[in-house]
Amino acid sequence: MNTIDYIYRFDPEKPSAKPPPRDEEAARRVLEDGNRLFSQWMESCRTRTPSRGEPRYIVSCNGLEVGMPRTYGEMPRQSPFAVVVGCSDARVPTEMLFGQGFNDLFVIRVAGNVMGDVCQASVDFALANLSESVRVVVVLGHSGCGAVTAAVDAYLRPLKFWSKTVTPMLRSLTQSLFVAVREAANGLKEVWGHDAADAPGYREALIESAVCINAAQAAFGLRQEVEGTGKWEVEVLYGVHNIRNHQVCMPVDPSAPRCDENVRLASAPSNPKEFHALAVQMARILKRDDPCLAPKTIAPPVEVAPVPGEAVSGTRVQ
């Protein structure tokens, strides 16, 4: 029978065939290559293109490090190379979409990938106790995020925010996303014009842009925390999982077809001004009346240089 396989494989003859990344740049490449593998598999499922002979989509795993201790009673050692802060959305299987297996990722999932106290404490735990193996911290948003959508709808219709069906805790979660939504709205207004809110597709564009800015803002905050602890060797990255083409990109064109060149994790912003630059960039990508503004291959995120003489909190020292 022809099947389309995505396999987690353990080779007892070569249990350590997949060495951990040696530094932050190697870790970034491992995650990006893993996402290319996953998106290729998802594309083959969509087009019903089965594997021929040996399955092509294989993730190497070392089972000895997780559930098969070599000595009776010995606990396996935790050694992830990446900390990933992502959304709880069931459509975003973190290990799979990065092509990783057992003991590769330390995953923290919360609705809207919002950095609350417990979420931040989990990151701090990983950096304090797993520092020998952790190379990168990644904030992962995703297209069509329900939490961001709720924040956008509350922004557009404030009375909805105070509905009796919205619990105080859910209201608090939504409120924490308003800054990202407002920044996205400012970008759309600048690019689309003052009547942007009346344009067709405005709500959907606001959601897509706010998802990216929310991830950027969380990464900015994490970068400050990581550098504050003196973990200069740990890089903070961010990206958005485009559920339509199953690729992790930054910035994100929601309508872009799957293309290996589009897979890109961006470095965390070092300057808050980069949030507005990203909002403008997303607004241009989402402007549907000009096809040239929605390229198939997406340009890297815009980097904003600090103003001379201006002190910028969280800037990496070279």
Image (cartoon, helix red, strand yellow):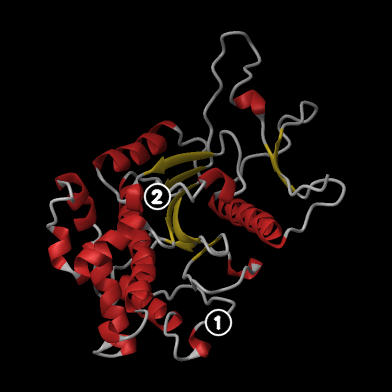
Q: Residue at x 18, y 50 (%)?
A: 165
Image location of residue 1, percent across then percent down? 83, 44
Q: Is residue 178 left or right of residue 206?
A: left
Give the percent coordinates (x, y) of residue 134.
Answer: 49, 41
Sequence order check, earlier mark of 1 and 2:
2
Residue 304 visible in rendering: no
Residue 144 visible: yes
Quadrant including the C terminus: bottom left
How packed mark 1 is, by other alpha carbons closer than 10 Å (few <14, some 14-19, many 20 or more), is: few
Task: Measuring from the top left, give residue 18's x and y in whole percent.
Answer: 69, 39
Question: Would you say 10 lies left or right of 189 here?
Answer: right
User: Would residue 167 appear left or right of 277 to someone viewing this image?
Assistant: left
Q: Residue at x 21, y 71 (%)?
A: 156
- 166 w.r.t. 180: above or below: above
Q: Residues within 10 Å of mark 2 (few under 14, many from 20)?
A: many
- What residue is disc 1 on? 295
Q: Residue at x 27, y 85 (%)?
A: 198
**Residue type, numbered disc 2:** Cys
Residue 199 marker? none
Residue marked by disc 2: 87
Where residue 179 sits in the image (x, y, percent)?
Answer: 22, 65
- Please identify the quarter of the rendering in which residue 303 is found: bottom left
Q: Amino acid at mark 1?
A: Pro
Direction from residue 137 to residue 220 in the image, left or right? left
Q: Nearer the viewer, residue 14 or 54?
A: 54
Q: Quadrant of residue 209?
A: bottom left
Q: Residue at 82% across / 48% down in the picture?
A: 2
Identity of the residue furthest to the right in this view: 53
| Residue in front for this viewpoint, 132 or 118 | 118
